[in-house]
Image (cartoon, rainbow, N blue to C red):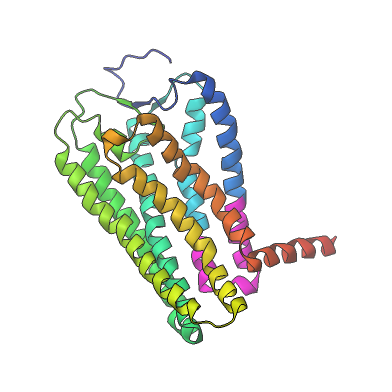
Amino acid sequence: MEQRNESSFAGFILLGFSDRLELELILFVVLLIFYIFTLLGNTTIIALSYLDPRLDTPMYFFLSNLSFLDMCYTTSIVPQLLFNLSRADKSISFGGCIVQMYISLALGCTECILLGVMAIDRYAAVCRPLHYTVIMHPRLCALMASASWITGFANSLLQTVLVFLLPRCGRNKLEHFFCEIPPFLKLACVDTTMNVYEIFVAGIIILLTPVALIVFSYGRIVRAVLRIKSTAGQRKAFGTCGSHLTVVSLFFGTAIYVYYQPSSNISQDQEKFMSLFYTVIIPMTNPLIYTLRNRDVKGAIKKVLWKDFDSR
């Protein structure tokens, strides 16, 4: 690592994986590939939602929002990570760290709420099929999506300001690969108990409330599906929800593990790799999950490709 005068350096050192130099090159190549596939996959979902009239439904409106969000979320973290993995200097400016924390946290919170909103959409589709288009009309969908984004960014603003107000007494070495709140609190040279309590309360609202909403929605969905007499009908109903439930399980499972696991029970390496999972792996797998488990999306892909082939 390049030597610098730490007393005159106002930024932060992202230690990341610098203690495993042999792993950095492998991580660089793997993360670069994952990042490219994340951009391609999520761009494809967004494009298909606009190109195919059959996908002009509330479900794909929310899915387009999720895909755009995943691209932004990954972009707020991965380029800086790739840059640091490719050089000895792991520094990030003070302003860059603030921006990265604010945007990544805002997008992560927005995704939590948006996944809860998507559960409401699936509940309406399965349990109220005859009134689905009336309940989930475009204005309500736009309002719910906007509320998700506004709430996520407002919460992130509060969290980021409170964290950066903490005195660090010159400490600037962050034991992580990006500016995230849990490892950032460890830099503080004062008691952070109140911050931990505040984050816990915010987590209940942003993280656990959508989980409760999802559990409630899918409980009602399961009851409705079990009332369907035909096996084909049950399979179709579960099929419309399977992709969303898979994404929910992956995202919330890892996020809850990182944010609600006692710090004494999780090592720094575990925290880093779990963070890699929900910041890099999940945004890449979301398009695959929705594509492989969804006939409409696969049909739209074939239609677009076939149209391009015929035009030649």
Q: What percent of the width, then of the height, locates residue 267?
A: 35, 31
Image quadrant holding the N terminus, namely top left
| Above-or-below relation of 59 to 65 | below
Q: Is residue 288 above or below residue 59?
A: above
Q: Quadrant of residue 266?
A: top left
Q: Nearer the viewer, residue 294 or 187?
A: 294
At 21% from the left edge and 53% from the top edge, which residue is drawn? 201
Magenta segment: 41-65
Q: Nearer the viewer, residue 185 or 56?
A: 185
Q: Is residue 56 visible?
A: no
Which residue is at the front of the view, 125 or 55?
125
Residue 177 location, quadrant: top left
**Image quarter in which the C terminus is found:** bottom right
159 lies left or right of 26: left
Nearer-the-camera pick, 219 or 89: 219
Q: Residue at x 79, y 64 (%)?
A: 306
